[in-house]
Image (tube, rainbow, N blue to C red):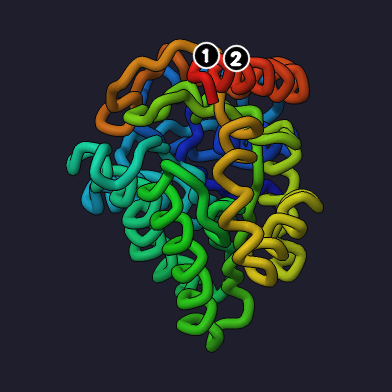
Amino acid sequence: MSTSRVVLVTGASSGIGEAVVRQAARRGDHVVLVGRAAGALDRVALACEDLGAASAQVAQADVSDDAQVASAVAAALARHGRLDVVVSCAGVVAYGRVPDVPVEVFDQVLATNLNGPVNLARHVLPVLRDQREGSLVLVGSLIGHIAVPDMAAYVLSKWGVRALVRQLRVDNRDVPRVRIGYVAPGGVDTPIYRQAATYGDSVGRPPFPVDPPERVADRVLTVADHPWRGGQVGLSNVVIRFGFTVLPWAYDRLVGPLFKVVAQDLVAPVVHGPGNVLAPRQELDRLRGDYGNALVGVGANLVEAVRRRVASGA
């Protein structure tokens, strides 16, 4: 009898989602790739077949649309008859203060990042409960535990994902083999920052220290079997959360200047617009973001920050 599992992943066209389906393919699983961009999904599906996937199925869907999620789950069940591991990776980012981000962009960040996992859970959990086993893993973020400047929509959505995980665990305690996992990465080398909506005075980049998407994918698939091993990816997450929780007065004073240097690109030109929030930009969909050495980026930001300070006469 085949031991290949059926692994469904949203946001599978790039970044962490792509890394997860690639890892599942390497171990010979059946993979179901869910995302908005058909061309990018086809690219990743071909790569998964080359890597040894038992099969690779594409299900085009926008996770913020409940009917499309229902259709994607139904297509996977029609082909495989079951689901073993389901991973919610789909996400978008908007930079800017609350008044500066257009309402449709702000709302779509929430719809994708929070309503998307809710829609997925709505259609997946009845399947797992009927099977009496299976795993649902939600990928959150360190930012779901803290606050950072100019990312209100993303912060709200990721705090919501963390709350959703706790609620789903409470609601499904009666079926012990239905596992609800949670993984919270920090900075990851994915294209999400290049694709972000931008309405502030600088563009984003992954904050130091930066993990490769494969490291997060390894944790996701480990958590699928052992949910108690989940949570934060990287020691720096623990340190930052400690500051936010235990030393809020210090955190609030320091997060602004530190975030600007560590998690933004002060040198890159700023082009305001919705990025891929309202529609996919599959020309930017790929496994990695290729931002270069993070410490070099921090150094360039420091030089630019000093230049701006001198130019302003401060």
- Figure label count: 2
The residue that appears at 70% across and 28% down in the rendered structure is: 52
SS at mark 1 in the image? helix
Query: Which disc number belongs to residue 231?
Result: none
The residue that appears at 32% across and 33% down in the rendered structure is: 277
Q: Where is residue 107 in the image (x, y as percent from the top left)?
A: 24, 47
* Badge 2: residue crowd in 10 Å (few <14, some 14–19, many ≥20): few
Q: In this view, does 7 lie above or below 49?
A: below
Q: Where is residue 36 in the image (x, y as percent from the top left)?
A: 34, 31
The answer for how far apart the CA atoms under marks 1 and 2 are is: 6 Å
In the image: residue 80, left or right of residue 118: right
Q: Where is mark 2, residue-wise?
A: 307
The residue that appears at 62% across and 81% down in the rendered structure is: 176
Q: Position of residue 62 (x, y in %)?
A: 30, 39
Q: Nearer the viewer, mark 1 or mark 2?
A: 1
Residue 197 is at least partly visible in this image = no
SS at mark 2 in the image? helix
Q: Position of residue 22 (x, y in %)?
A: 65, 31
Residue 271 is at least partly visible in this image = yes
Q: In this view, does 236 lie above or below 188?
A: below
In the image: residue 70, left or right of residue 249: left
Q: Where is mark 1, residue-wise?
A: 311
